[in-house]
Image (spheres, grey):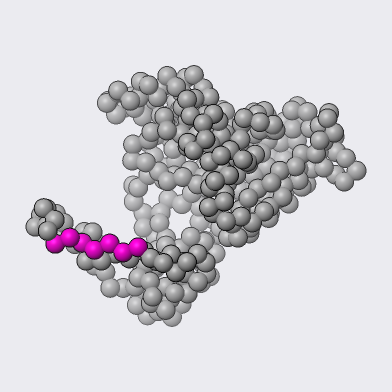
Amino acid sequence: KDKYIAITRRKSYWDEDNPKGVGFSNFDTIKWVVIRDERLMFEKFKKGELDIYPVGRAQWWKDECDFDNVKRGLVQKRRIFNDEPRGMSGLAFNMREAPFNDKRVRTAFAHLFNREQLMEKLFYNQYTYLDSYFPGSIYENPRNPKYRYDPDKAVKLLKEAGWKTRNSEGWLINDKNEIFELTLNIDQSMERIFTPVQSDLKKVGIKMNLVQTTGPTMFSMVMERKFKITYQAWGGLMFPNPETSWHSDLADSNNTNNLCGVKNKRIDEICKEYNVVFDQATRVRMIQEVDSILMDIQPYALGWYAPYTRVLYWNKFGHPE
């Protein structure tokens, strides 16, 4: 708590005098301060204790980022659009065990993830639906199906998977008389998002318990596969690397990026070929095929992304036009 990491630029750097470095990444010192509370971080920025603040919440951007120093121009409020690769996020399913070893259940959840409501009520329509595992890039397969909130379709799929009846309390049960019950570990900032999701699941008879957990504990549980469902977000790569996240060799190993346990022979074949193919058009086609296969497997109920970066910064930095 309250610790920091600081790095200082070396004056003896061998490429110090390269004119390409002028005005780019040449701060004398960069300091990262550990602040665990999101609200406290925002307040520290407004007091001038931090120079830059990436705004993670759409509501704050809309309702709280036009304070006096922004209006005066002392703080700049910017949405930065560029070609930076976007990552993907969503509800990741542990496909190694019930109930998510059944594709029908995974697909049902994709139709129960009411992103439309979240977009309108919480995100002020500032985000874009994720319909790909390689979003906003040439690698996204334009022919991917688009899963949207459809509880009727979800209920039909759940019935086909054996979740046909409800008990006296209204929860779905299978032929073993087991309740459809899950635990989703979240941090405090995600409660506002998943409380409405919890309510939507309850309407169809699924009991989802929300448990506030620390980041390190959640990380350990996910890496050791001690979860049925978890919310995950990934950064994007300039050149996608499907092998590290989707290869079958990693499906049953702890501490790998193949969280869901995806095993697919065709993806494995593509990974092997992709590593030695250097024609860009061919590489794009290969990743688009991986994207299509993943959309069919449904290891995630995909979430949303922003095609830009929201940032506040104190107006003391130069930048190119």
The image quadrant of residue 205 is top right
Residue segment shown in magenta: 5-11
Seen at 29% across and 29% down, the residue is 280
Q: How many numbered badges does the structure rendering display? A: 0
Residue 71 visible in rendering = no
User: Where does residue 35 sit, x and y in percent of width and height?
Assistant: 46, 66
Q: Is residue 76 above or below residue 148?
A: below
Relative image position of residue 192 (x, y in whole percent) = 63, 59
Which is nearer the eye, 274 or 10? 10
Q: Residue furthest right?
A: 168
Expressed as whole percent of the image width and height from the top left, the position of residue 81 reads 36, 54
Quadrant of image for the C terminus: bottom left
Q: Is residue 222 left or right of residue 24?
A: right
- Which residue is at the far left? 17
Is residue 163 visible in this depiction of the protein? yes
Residue at x 61% of width, y 31% of height: 95
Query: Is residue 9 highlighted in magenta?
Result: yes
Residue 232 position within the rendered picture, expressed as x and y whole percent measured from the top left: 53, 45
Query: What residue is at 50 percent from the left and 71 percent from the top?
Result: 40
Q: Is residue 79 magenta?
A: no
Q: Is residue 211 left or right of residue 70?
A: right
Seen at 57% across and 49% down, the residue is 218
Q: Nearer the viewer, residue 15 or 129?
A: 15
- The image quarter containing residue 104 is top right
Decide: is 204 above or below 27: above
